Image: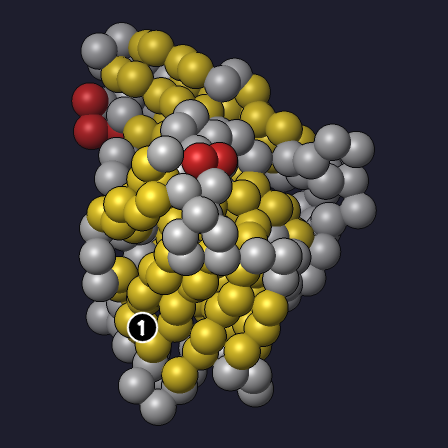
Amino acid sequence: DTGVSQDPRHKITKRGQNVTFRCDPISEHNRLYWYRQTLGQGPEFLTYFQNEAQLEKSRLLSDRFSAERPKGSFSTLEIQRTEQGDSAMYLCASSPGFHGYTFGSGTRLTVV
Amino acid sequence: GESVGLHLPTLSVQEGDNSIINCAYSNSASDYFIWYKQESGKGPQFIIDIRSNMDKRQGQRVTVLLNKTVKHLSLQIAATQPGDSAVYFCAENSQAGYALNFGKGTSLLVTP
């Protein structure tokens, strides 16, 4: 296992389109997180899964954002009806427990 | 709300010198602190962590100091190298939480 994988690395989309990003965590990690990072800022927490259960989603930015982890392994983050303000880096992380976070390289979204 | 912040947005040091990056936090319940390094286009990379029952922890060329009295955290990098050039973030959470709270970051530039 080479770490947390995210796909795609870059996505350019037109405003109003839907986008979906995928995250493959480290296989033995049961916790998975999504963060958003805008230029010059630190990552901002969005949502958290423990196995397949989404235990925190109140910090998703709007109802256009949703995430799934159907089998407790990979996860997807979907943004519907994208807006220019959604342009950012979307980071996934996983951990085996309270400690040991490992981040992926992120998906950079550009909404034009 | 509670926040994590950094004292200096940019730091320029000469190769071979020691670097010190500072961070202040405001959440008294924080009990776990992490320093991350982020290079352009990549996700945050774990450097070193420290729990609140410690005040110092050393790694390879890096030392983290924690002063709970004044809620201050620092990262010391010995013999700074050009490969250390990156943005450095401090992050914190508590046993009651799962989301890492990041500061804005300090850009470290190592000059030859």
Element type where label 1 sits in the image: strand
Q: How many marks?
A: 1
**Residue appearing at x 60%, y 53% in the figure:** A101
Which percent across, then down, holds residue B95? 55, 76
**Residue appearing at x 31%, y 57% in the figure:** B103
The amino acid on which the numbered mark 1 sits, given as a three-letter code, is Tyr
Which percent across, then down, holds residue A57? 44, 51
Q: Quadrant of the C terminus of chain A?
A: top left
Inspect this view and state whether residue A36 appears: no
For this rendering, which residue is in front, B29 or A86?
A: B29
**Residue appearing at x 31%, y 29% in the figure:** A88
> Which residue is tagged 1?
B25
**Residue appearing at x 74%, y 31% in the figure:** A2
Name which quarter of the figure residue A81 lies in. Answer: top left
For this rendering, which residue is in front, B65 or A53?
A: B65
| Dot 1 crowding, Cα within 10 Å, few <14, some 14–19, many 20+ | many
Report the chain holding disc 1: B
